[in-house]
Amino acid sequence: MLVTSVEYRCSPEMLTIVSMLSVSVFYRPTERMEEADAAREKFNVPESDHLTLLNVFHQWKNHLYRDDWAMRHFLHPKLLRKAREVRQQLEDIMKFQKMEIISAGTNYDVVRKAITAGYFHQAARIKGIGEFVNIRSGLPTHLHPTSALYGLGSELGSVFYSVKEKNFDDRGLRRQADREFSKRAELETEMAKQREESARKVIEDASAAKASSGAKAKIIVPGTPQHTGIGAGSHVTQTPRRRVGI
């Protein structure tokens, strides 16, 4: 899409769309789902999810990239900043390749044409209510429930889509993954403690065995020479033997 945007003279808009496709900026807390849906609808551009993302970025930019504004509208500030960084990197690459960066302003029909040209291999035609098939491969495709096109039914014609990971916004699955990760972390910590305890016990047993072997009591056998005195005046005596009568 970035290459075709040069031809259609809408590179800045396409840079924003491509960078916003790299993240998922909307969030929908369970306890405030209706508020989140209402906030999202304010950004919707009829019949285009890509232009909806462009509108979100423009609104965030108009409010000076403020985090409090993003959170108030149920947008991830961190992911918006990530999209902004990606956009800057892509813009630097285009400038390095000497590709013209010319804005289309508010002429969104030109942007739609560039998207269509870039996504020609992902064109789908309508088959039924909410069902589409890829024109080239015939594979079935479905609209994501968060799509601006969802629920429009037979009013739609052909669509050009980008792939969205299934259940990416499912907070339940994300919480379950977090719990499993925590369980694994706790198990690994417990196993590490057990290994440390076993290693410490082995060291203590080895030290005790060494100490006991070096501290064995000496047994004096009758007739064994004994040293008495200190220094040069010491002399050797023998343990007296017991006389046994007959």
Image (cartoon, helix red, strand yellow):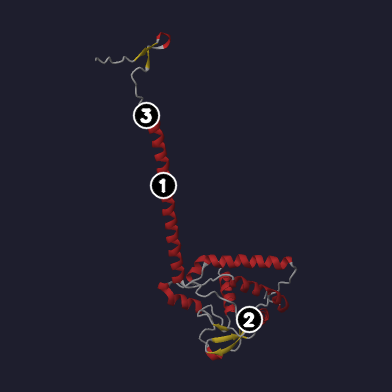
| Amino acid type of the residue that numbered disc 1 sits on in the rendered structure | Ser
- Name the residue carrying label 1: 198
Query: Quick one: 66 or 123, which is closer to the camera?
Result: 123
Which residue ends up furthest to the top in the rendered image? Answer: 233
Query: Could you tell me which quadrant the N terminus lies in?
Result: bottom right
Q: Residue 239: x percent and y percent?
A: 33, 15
- Name the residue carrying label 2: 122
Residue located 60% across and 80% down the image: 161
| Amino acid type of the residue that numbered disc 3 sits on in the rendered structure | Lys
Q: What is the secondary structure assignment of the residue under circle 2?
A: helix
Q: In this view, does 6 lie above or below 81?
A: below
Mark 1 nearby-residue class (10 Å; few <14, some 14–19, many ≥20): few
Q: Is residue 238 above or below residue 1?
A: above
| Amino acid type of the residue that numbered disc 2 sits on in the rendered structure | Gln
Asked whether the beta carbons under mark 2 and mark 1 sit within 8 Å of each other, the answer is no
Asked whether the beta carbons under mark 3 and mark 1 sit within 8 Å of each other, the answer is no
- Name the residue carrying label 3: 216
Mark 3 / mark 1, whichever is N-terminal:
1
Which residue ends up furthest to the front in the rendered image? Answer: 246
Mark 2 / mark 1, whichever is N-terminal:
2
Residue located 59% across and 73% down the image: 21
